[in-house]
Structure formats: structure tokens, C-alpha cells
Image (tube, helix red, strand yellow):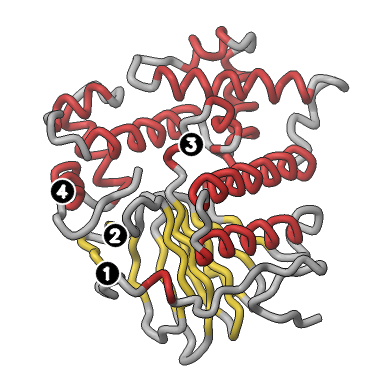
């Protein structure tokens, strides 16, 4: 059934502002992109940007440090991330994790809401480690692919949009709370749908989730140290080989790749502080040498650490974590 594109589902009506472009009046319209890295332009005092986009201009491959959510409302929209092309129909949702390289292919006409969300504050919460694996790749949400939570996620996005455009007094706090709720829904759904640790003994699944969340929290806290697979496996009570297999099942990454991604994320934050030299950034992020850091950073981000720092000091935009 086709619903009113700008109103909520399931009988919940979102308060609609007179103009969904109103929050973009100070937006220059010029994208700040170099070497695929886009610096997002935010409003003062805001960690988010939402707009109703009706442009028929494609966006070449790029990435940014904010999470992006796309919700078409008129006509389709296509996003290519990695080797996957996502064809989004109206009311379908695509969540692109921070740092995801993506290209946008736009039809001649149509409208879609675009949410650019700085989740740096939320990602520093201790329990967020268990959500990180969900953000390892884009999430394509439809009523068919996520039947249990699609309506909930859709309505959360409507509430976020309402808070943002109506400029409520505590809009920023409200949006953060709504984002937390969104991540909780995704986390609970993943635990149900993926049937994690199904080959383990009955009753062990919940215990294993807790132990692997502890492992991820340990990585979050100690990524700058020399963490070995053997040591972390022992810390959470598994043999090396059992831990390695279950870690891949839980995160969709092997241990070394996950640790590397976490270190790169830490390096991005440190590079925004000019008081740190590139060498200090490398060492404080857990890389053993500057050459290894430069090579891996360029491989993962398509840009050198020095180039990233230069982009972060652009006078026209502020980066997000």
C-alpha cells in the first residue's frame, strides 16, 4: 500500500513544518570533497544535517565520517557501496556506516530525505561496542528484509525529522535519544535474526554474546596497545581457535581486520588535533610504525594521513568524528 510520503506510518502523524528546505537556507550547496573525502557542513550547534533532496545530480565515490541515512519518497534512488548496488524504492531505507565509500546514481526526477548524522558521542558509550558489527556494512531496510523492526525504524526517522525541522528547544538531545533507540532496535533484531552461536551448547548463546561484547569493549579501550589474538581469547575464556571462529561469526570480521579498523577510526580523531604529529598519531592509534600506518590508512581511506589532516583544517567546514 502506498502511503503519504511525508507522514508517518501506522497512524502516527509526524508534525510537518511548512518547508522541508528551511534548515538548508545557510547551506552553500557546494560539496567540500577532495580525494573522495567529504567534509560535511553542519549548522552551528548541531551534530546532524537533514534535507529534502530533489537534485538530479549524481555524486561520485566519496566517504565521510558521519553516518548517512537515505529515505526516498518519490521515485527510486540508487547507491553503490563496494560491489553492491542498492536500488531504493520509496519508503525503503539505506543506512551507510561512517567511513563507507559510496557513489550515488540519481534518476532524472524524484525526492528523498537524506540524514547525515554525527554518531561520535553515541559511539563512545561503553555498550556501543556490541553495535559496531552491525555497522560493518550498509543496512538495507524494507518491510520484507526487516519485518520485525521496519515500522519502528521508519517511525524513529520520522520523529528525528520532526525534531530537526521544527527546531524544538531540546532537539539535539531528543535526536540523540532517538538514535540510541534506533541502534537498540537494530541490536535486538540482529540477536534474534542471525541466530548467533547456534552451534554452541544450548543456553550458551546469551553468555557468548556477553563475552564477545566484553572483548569488543576491551579493544575499544586498549586498541593503542599490542593486543594479540591469544591474549584476548584468554581474557574472555576461549581457546585461540575457538575465539577466532566465533569472533568472525559475531562481527563478520577476522580479529586483525577488526582491530585495524578500530585503530584507523582512532587515528581519524587524532588527526583532527594539530598538536599531534603524524608519528604520534600512528603510535597513539596502535600502529607499530609510521610506514605501516601510512600504507594502511591510504588503503582503507583512499587518502594519506597528511591529506586527511589538511582536509580537516579546511576553514569552510568542520569535520565530524
Helix, strand or loop at label 3? It is: helix
Looking at marks 4 and 1 on the same chain, the residue that comes earlier in the sequence is marked by 1
**Lower position in the chain sequence, tag 4 or tag 2:** 2
Q: Return the disc, 1 or 2, that comes first in the chain's sequence.
A: 1
Question: Between marks 4 and 2, how big is the CA–CA gap?
Answer: 13 Å
Q: Residues within 10 Å of mark 1 (few under 14, many from 20)?
A: few
Q: Position of residue 45 (x, y in %)?
A: 35, 50
Pointer 4 residue: 313
Kindly check if marks 3 and 4 are in contact, taking CB atoms under 8 A apart as contact.
no
Question: Which numbered mark, 4 or 2, is in the foreground of this view?
Answer: 4
Q: CA distance from mark 1 to mark 3?
A: 26 Å
Horizontal and vertical percent position of residue 314: 15, 54
Residue 146 left/right relative to 45: right
Q: Which residue position holds label 1?
A: 31
Q: According to the image, label 3 marks what residue?
A: 123
Mark 2 lies on residue: 38
Q: CA distance from mark 3 to mark 4?
A: 23 Å
Mark 1 touches mark 2? (CB < 8 Å) = yes
Look at the picture and state if 126 lies above or below 306: above
- Tag 1 and tag 3, C-beta contact below 8 Å: no
Neighbourhood count class around disc 4 (C-alpha, 10 Å): few under 14, some 14–19, many 20 upward: some
- Quarter the N terminus occupies: bottom right
Where does the C terminus fall, quadrant-wise?
top left
Q: Please identify the quarter of the rendering in which residue 315 is found.
A: bottom left
The residue positioned 42% from the left and 29% from the top of the image is: 259
Amino acid at each position: 500500500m502506498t502511503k503519504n510520503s511525508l507522514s508517518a506510518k501506522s497512524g502516527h502523524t509526524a508534525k510537518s513544518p511548512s518547508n522541508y528546505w528551511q534548515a538548508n537556507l545557510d547551506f552553500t550547496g557546494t560539496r567540500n570533497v577532495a580525494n573522495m573525502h567529504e567534509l560535511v557542513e553542519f549548522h552551528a550547534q548541531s551534530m546532524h544535517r537533514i534535507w529534502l533532496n530533489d537534485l538530479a545530480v549524481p555524486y561520485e565515490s566519496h566517504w565521510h565520517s558521519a553516518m548517512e541515512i537515505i529515505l526516498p519518497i518519490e521515485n527510486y534512488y540508487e547507491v553503490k557501496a563496494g560491489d553492491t548496488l542498492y536500488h531504493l524504492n520509496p519508503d525503503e531505507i539505506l543506512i551507510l556506516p561512517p567511513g563507507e565509500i559510496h557513489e550515488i546514481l540519481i534518476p532524472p526526477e524524484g525526492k528523498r530525505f537524506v540524514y547525515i548524522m554525527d554518531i561520535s558521542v553515541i559511539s563512545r558509550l561503553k555498550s556501543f561496542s556490541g553495535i559496531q558489527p552491525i555497522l560493518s556494512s550498509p543496512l538495507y531496510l524494507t518491510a520484507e528484509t526487516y519485518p520485525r523492526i521496519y515500522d519502528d525504524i521508519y517511525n524513529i526517522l520520522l520523529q528525528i525529522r520532526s525534531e530537526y525541522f521544527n527546531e524544538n528547544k531540546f532537539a539535539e538531545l531528543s535526536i540523540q535519544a532517538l538514535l540510541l533507540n534506533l541502534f537498540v532496535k537494530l541490536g535486538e533484531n540482529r540477536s534474534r535474526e542471525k541466530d548467533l552461536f547456534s552451534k554452541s551448547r544450548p543456553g550458551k548463546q546469551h553468555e557468548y554474546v556477553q563475552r564477545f561484547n566484553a572483548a569488543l569493549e576491551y579493544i575499544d579501550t586498549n586498541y593503542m596497545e599490542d593486543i594479540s589474538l591469544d591474549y584476548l581469547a584468554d581474557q574472555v575464556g576461549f581457546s585461540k581457535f575457538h575465539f577466532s571462529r566465533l569472533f568472525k561469526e559475531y562481527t563478520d570480521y577476522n580479529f586483525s581486520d577488526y582491530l585495524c579498523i578500530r585503530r584507523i577510526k582512532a587515528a581519524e580523531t587524532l588527526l583532527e588535533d594539530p598538536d599531534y604529529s603524524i608519528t604520534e598519531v600512528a603510535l597513539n592509534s596502535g600502529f607499530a610504525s609510521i610506514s605501516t600506518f601510512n600504507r594502511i590508512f591510504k588503503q582503507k581511506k583512499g587518502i594519506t594521513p597528511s591529506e586527511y589532516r589538511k582536509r580537516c583544517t579546511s576553514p569552510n567546514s568542520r569535520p565530524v568524528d
